[in-house]
Each structure stands twice: as C-alpha cells, then as structure tokens.
Image: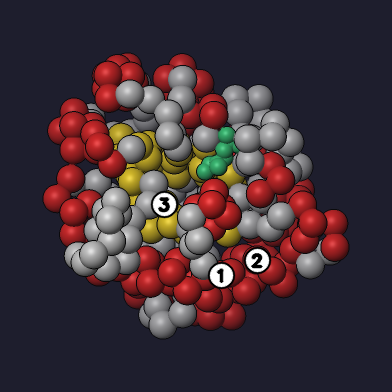
Amino acid sequence: MNNLRRPVIAGNWKMYKTRDEALQFIYAVNQEVPNREVVESVVCANDVFLRDLVKRQGENIKIGAQNMHYAENGAFTGETSPLMLETTGVEYVIIGHSERRAMFNESDETVNLKVHAAIKHELTPIICVGESLEIREAGTTDAVVKNQVVKAYLNIDRHQALKTIVAYEPIWAIGTGKTATPEQAEETIKNIRGVLKELYGEDVSSRVRILYGGSVNTKNVDSLLAQENIDGALVGGASLDAASYLTLVNAAKK
Ligand SMILES: O=C(CO)COP(=O)(O)O
C-alpha cells in the first residue's frame, strides 16, 4: 500500500445471503469497521435488498451493487439500470466481474459503457480485469490485461479516471483457494498502474486505487497488502463471515 491512496476492502457477496443474513452482517460490523478516513469498507450485495442495507449502514461502511445495465431504461428484462441503483443510495458498483464476462456475455465494450454510466450516476465503478489460467501459462497476461484496461477506459477523461477503482482478479485464483503470490499480484498490478500512466500520466495513475481479488483470506491478506501497488482487496468467500471481514478491513488499517 502507499500513503497516496486510501485502502479499499470490498466484499463481493455474489449470490449468497438472504436479506436477514445480510442485515445481521451489517449490524455486526457497523460499529467495528475502521474509520472511513483510514479504510474504505464496502460490501457489494444483491440488488433486492440494497436499499435496506443502505438504510442501516453505519458511518464507516458503504454498500455497492455487483452489476448494472449501462442504459437508464429500456426493454431489458431482468436488468437493473444505473438510475435505479442511484435510488437505492449505493455508492459503488462492480463492473465486468469475470463471472459476468464468462456467464453473462459481458465484453470489454459493455464494460466501457457501464463505466461511463456509473460515473455519470456518481457511482464508483470497481472495474474488474484478469486473465485465465491458459493466458497466464502462455505468458501473455500483461498484454491481455493491458487490453482490458485500455478498453474499459475508452473515452474516459483524467478527471473521470480518478473516480474509478480497478480490481485485478486472475480467474484461476477465484474461488479456487489458489491465490496469486503477493509478487505475482504486485507484478500485474504494477503493470496496470503503468497502463494508467500511459493513458493519463503519473498524477492520475499514482492516485487510482488498484485492488487484488482471488482467494484473499485472513491468512494471506497481510502479505498481499504489503505490496507497494496493492491498495486493497475485492473478496468473495472470506467476506461472507462478519469476523473474517473485520479481520480483513483491520489488516488494511496499517
Ligand atoms: O471473485 C472474487 C471477488 O470478486 C473472489 O472470490 P473469492 O475471494 O471467493 O476467491
């Protein structure tokens, strides 16, 4: 981590937790999470109860969505628009998670449209990028991730770029218990920061937060956050339990 950038720990609950379970979690962590000036603690939950969570969130925890459509309205059965998310009071939205890219036809183009829509609606986009095992083994990770980043930021200006967060999530490390080593994660994240520098200059690239995601847990979080360019984590499984989540947010306090 680096002093220029406030750490972010974002839980991605995916399709887990009922409304009651989600509310219990929020009550359990509200008073326990670090001050927001020190760590940005976020949980990204299901759309159905986002508003309930926002109403009950404490001062130091914020709620995010896991996806949204890029259009404000339209004939898109089953989708949620940025306008609708705005009315829930959420402040963050995950965009382009690899599960959505793989299972729900998200492309670099729709990711870019969603980044534009999020910024327009004052939602902080957490933009996910990352390579498959095949790509890692072929040695083309840097090129593939660079391409994802460049396309996600198409026609985004420097002022808008400062409002974004990137999450580097190697697909082979998601839900597999197989974490990238801190050095592997740092290497790719440093490369992503380099791409942002090419696009926007150092003033911007040194201020955009870049998170690591993929089997982050209470045991490996310290070594990941110790890396210069890793500014936090996007966490699936280990964010579901309140005690484990609190350990992760407290690890980012140092
Ligand atoms: O996909 C992830 C977060 O978005 C990572 O999930 P896990 O932490 O369960 O590997």
Relative to 68, residue 32 above or below: above
Mark 1: is the Cβ under 8 angstroms from ligand 1? Answer: no
Identity of the residue drawn at 29% across and 34% down: 60
Residue 202: which quarter of the image? bottom right
Q: Is residue 152 above or below residue 4?
A: below
Q: CA distance from mark 2 to mark 1?
A: 6 Å
Label 3, ligand 1: CB separation under 8 Å: yes
Residue displayed at 71% across by 46% down: 172
- Indicate the quadrant where residue 132 lies: bottom right
Q: Is residue 204 visible?
A: no
Q: Nearer the viewer, residue 2 or 142?
A: 142
Seen at 77% across and 52% down, the residue is 133
Residue position for label 1: 149
Dot 1 and dot 3 residues touching (CB under 8 Å)? no
Find disc 3 in the rendering and name its residue.
Answer: 94
Q: Residue at x 59, y 80 (%)?
A: 198
Q: Amino acid at mark 1?
A: Val
Q: Are marks 2 and 1 in contact (CB under 8 Å)?
A: yes
Q: Earlier in the sequence, mark 2 or mark 3?
A: 3
- Which colouring convention does the figure follow? secondary structure
Q: Secondary structure at mark 3?
A: strand
The numbered mark, 1 or 3, whose residue comes first in the sequence reads 3
Residue matched to label 2: 145
Q: CA distance from mark 2 to mark 3?
A: 17 Å
**What mark, if any, has residue 231 been given in the picture?**
none
Q: Quadrant of ligand 1?
A: top right
Residue 32, image x and y in percent? 34, 21
- Callout 2 environment at 10 Å: few (<14), some (14 to 19), or many (20+)? many
Observer-nearest residue: 25 or 162? 25
Q: Identity of the amino acid at label 2?
A: Val
Give SS at disc 1: helix
